[in-house]
Amino acid sequence: MSRWITEEDIENLAVGAALLGTGGGGDPYLGKLMVQKCIRENGPIELIDPNQLSDQDTVIPVSMMGAPTIMTEKIPNGDESLKSLRLMEKQSGVKANATMPVECGGLNSTIPFVVASKAGIPVVDADGMGRAFPELQMETFHIHGVSASPTALHDERGNAVFLEAQDSPMIEHIARGVAVRMGGVAHAAMYKMTGKEVKDTSIHNTMSLCIDLGKAIRETQITKQNPIEVIKHVTKNSIYGEAIVLFEGKVTDVERKSTDGFVRGKATVSGLKSFIGKTLQVDFQNENLCAQIDGKVVAMVPDLITFLDSETGLPITTEGMKYGFRVICIGIPTPPIMRSDKAIEVWGPRYFGYDMDYVEIEKIHDKEESHV
Amino acid sequence: MSRWITEEDIENLAVGAALLGTGGGGDPYLGKLMVQKCIRENGPIELIDPNQLSDQDTVIPVSMMGAPTIMTEKIPNGDESLKSLRLMEKQSGVKANATMPVECGGLNSTIPFVVASKAGIPVVDADGMGRAFPELQMETFHIHGVSASPTALHDERGNAVFLEAQDSPMIEHIARGVAVRMGGVAHAAMYKMTGKEVKDTSIHNTMSLCIDLGKAIRETQITKQNPIEVIKHVTKNSIYGEAIVLFEGKVTDVERKSTDGFVRGKATVSGLKSFIGKTLQVDFQNENLCAQIDGKVVAMVPDLITFLDSETGLPITTEGMKYGFRVICIGIPTPPIMRSDKAIEVWGPRYFGYDMDYVEIEKIHDKEESHV
């Protein structure tokens, strides 16, 4: 059944997607404003369940790629992604029946709504990461056999690239080079799929989950409920596992470098309350990759690691982290589809250069608990 | 009138083009072998005068871009450039009536013959640089209003990029990023033109000149004439000015770094004979840019600066320069079309970061002479 997305839904979506975005996927404030303007102009936007697609439908996902730090400086005007979609349509000789996000993230979950509104097509309630990841081949689409080739890229100055490559990692490699030359950010249309492929390879209903999650968090500002309890409740009743509080403290350092089309660095947090005397370090490449407390790993990709504002429970993105912020760091167990051997090969800790095997966050946490 | 290019002509072309290539444009030995194989398989290749084109003909130039040091390691198989031409044809909905080189250079003057042989079309006797230059917008085509956009790029693994950009410098910027990601070298089809545009914007008959020049140099190995005298004679009777001997000596140092899709560095030569006690330094970015003797500039872009083997008069490319080589460094005045204000803006010394105005090589040399 279709759901018609309103301005209020988008407020919620932006918050929920930024939370699942684990620090990446772009600034939710920008994304929200862009979609709300579209809704004011063109009315509510249709969000459809993957099962509403016919097997023969054509779906073209859209997204931004590059360093989120740069996305907040080179603000999208919303037309670039539509142009990428149109370029893909023209080159492939098809018309998109729907668009969809490739990941959960403040900008990358909202941009498909902008394109949908402008093109008069629905958004599919699904994505290919179930969170945000930094590289283009890190998609359930790729893992289940859909190629990222061809890819259409656009920038705000009208420069356009249509790219066909031997496989999805090579698309990532070349497209990243193009994004760097386009000023650090590019607007992409990629993973063109049939309706059947979307149904078979995507993570279903993540946009609805983002809306529910964002709504629950935002409502605590009125109800004065504890946002962490609310997040635990929503995640427990989803395809994800129940959120786990990893740490609470004050940000004492953020190292951040925008290079090679990514933002890389680490955040250091000094413990407060029950974590006093301890130090958390979280490494990121656009997204948070690995969390360690006093040198001991407490969560790692692909499980979600997200910083929340201690007061409001609102998620903080990689590029928004600043010295002095009071934060709670939570971990969320990923759905089983994201933990297959093939999936761990694509986005597990070893891919990111960590010399360790993937251990599920709930297992690390269970062990911790039993020690206490 | 058409000229039918034989294996022997290609021996000469490769040498002459490497000489006008001023150190860049790729290894002449590789280029020669590729074309000769084509001629053995498909017969002689037609070289036509630009004036043989009808105004409505479509001409698609082909070339390699990247660091020449890498071209000798990632040896082209000849199909990549044809694939780029085909990609350009498909995307633009046209058929090429002819191809042509974008520059004079060991590889980049011969690759169009490979493509012509495989596609069954002629090569136009002209180019857009009258020498080799490192960047894609450094073309008389661009200077006279033909855009480098769109551009088609291919690599040896079947990765393909079709690029449309706001202007030719942006094509250079993005395509260079793609070439880097393709492993340091890409095969390009660009500057698609009408026959009229070729006639109006290209430097005519440079391929014939390369053949004549190469033939004259190679014949000195039999006639025992002085190759320098022969080069002076051929250049004097061309649209270029008479070649000037800048230096003679032994290579004592070559700094060379393949980075950002270019090879950059400098060669140092200790004087011999009448240059004893003096030191020549030549900076290069793929091509030789500026020659200084004991810190005094004796030649600069766009005039040609080329190293020749002292014994044979054969040109030495940037990537072939080695410690201990006995060399003669010559300068050749460029044709007037390459010295207009607009042209100097595109490829004069200031563009390459030198804080000096362009001074014609023959003026520098006249002054030198009058001092002696």
Image (spheres, coloured by chain):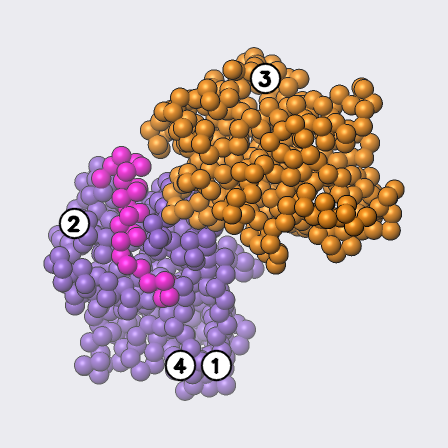
Chain colours: A purple, B orange
Q: Mark 1 belongs to which subunit? A: A
> Element at badge 3?
strand
Residue for badge 1: A252
Locate residue A90: give its quadrant. Answer: top left
The magenta span reads A71-95
Dominant SS in magenta: helix
- A132 horizontally vs A368: left or right: left
Res. A325 mark: 4
Q: Mark 2 belongs to which subunit? A: A
Say above or below: B327 vs B223.
below
Label 1 sits on what residue type?
Answer: Thr
Characterize the local packing of mark 4: few (<14), some (14-19) or many (20 or more) Cα atoms within 10 angstroms.
some
Residues beneath discs 3 and 1 located on the same chain: no
Characterize the local packing of mark 1: few (<14), some (14-19) or many (20 or more) Cα atoms within 10 angstroms.
some
Q: Marks 3 and 1, how far apart in space?
A: 72 Å
Residues at discs 4 and 3 in contact (Cβ within 8 Å): no
Q: Mark 3 belongs to which subunit? A: B
